[in-house]
Image: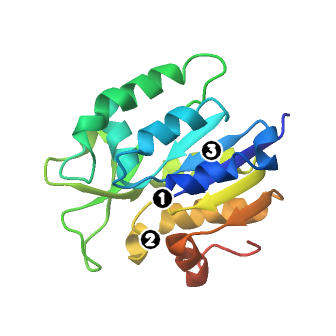
Amino acid sequence: MPITSTLIYSGSPLIACLTFSAPVSGLASSLMLDLIGLKQSLQVLERLSQKVDHLIVGGGIANTFIAAAGHAVGKSLHEPDLIPQAQALLEAGERAGRAAIPIPTDVVVAKEFSATAEADVKSLGDIAADDMIMDVGPDTAERLARLVSKAGTVVWNGPLGVFEFDQFGEGTHIVAQAVAESGAFSIAGGGDTLAAIASGRGLVGL
């Protein structure tokens, strides 16, 4: 099995560019990205898609990719004007030498952005017009964890969902635990990432 590296990212695209100009870039790689609200995010993904095996996106940019795949996202954070670029990246991911981008198959939604909001797990086909996507669902989290478990190098710079609210943090913690247990060389950084680690859930060994 080839050695892979994984980047879980939420923050300045400069970090990703610097990371993959370092020695880590010499490895075949799987990349996890969480790029929320950044107009330049798809430009970064375009460049990195030529360096890695997998791009795993989370947060608001994941919602843009979900919409690009033809699914409703309700009132979730996403950037409709970037859908054509996201579609192009999804199509490129089907070609050899470009990164595949796994889209969530289930998500955790709520009717409001609140610490007391009720969490509901739904498949992509069941998202309602008033739903907000707050996290990846359990099936998706386990699928991503299996992918991470095969990585030889992990660079983590962002959670997959609204981990600050316990009911929407499980996806981040499942994948984080997979990072911790993978035996990979791992680097974690960024404010949200450090906060997730400090929360202590599912981070044994990281």
Q: Position of residue 32 (x, y in %)?
A: 58, 48
Quadrant in which residue 127 is drawn: top left
The amino acid sitting under disc 3 is: Leu
Residue drawn 62% across the image and 44% down it: 31
The amino acid sitting under disc 1 is: Leu
The amino acid sitting under disc 2 is: Phe
Left or right of 11: which side holds 40? left
Image vertical order of residue 56 relative to residue 191, above or below:
above
Left or right of 170: which side holds 50? right
Residue drawn 18% across the image and 52% down it: 75
Residue drawn 25% across the image and 44% down it: 73
Secondary structure under tag 1 reads loop
The residue that disc 2 covers is: 163
User: Which class describes the residues within 10 Å of circle 1: few (<14), some (14-19), or many (20+)?
Assistant: many
Q: CA distance from mark 1 to mark 3?
A: 13 Å
Q: Are marks 1 and 2 in contact (CB under 8 Å)?
A: yes
Q: Nearer the viewer, residue 145 or 191?
A: 191
The residue that disc 3 covers is: 31
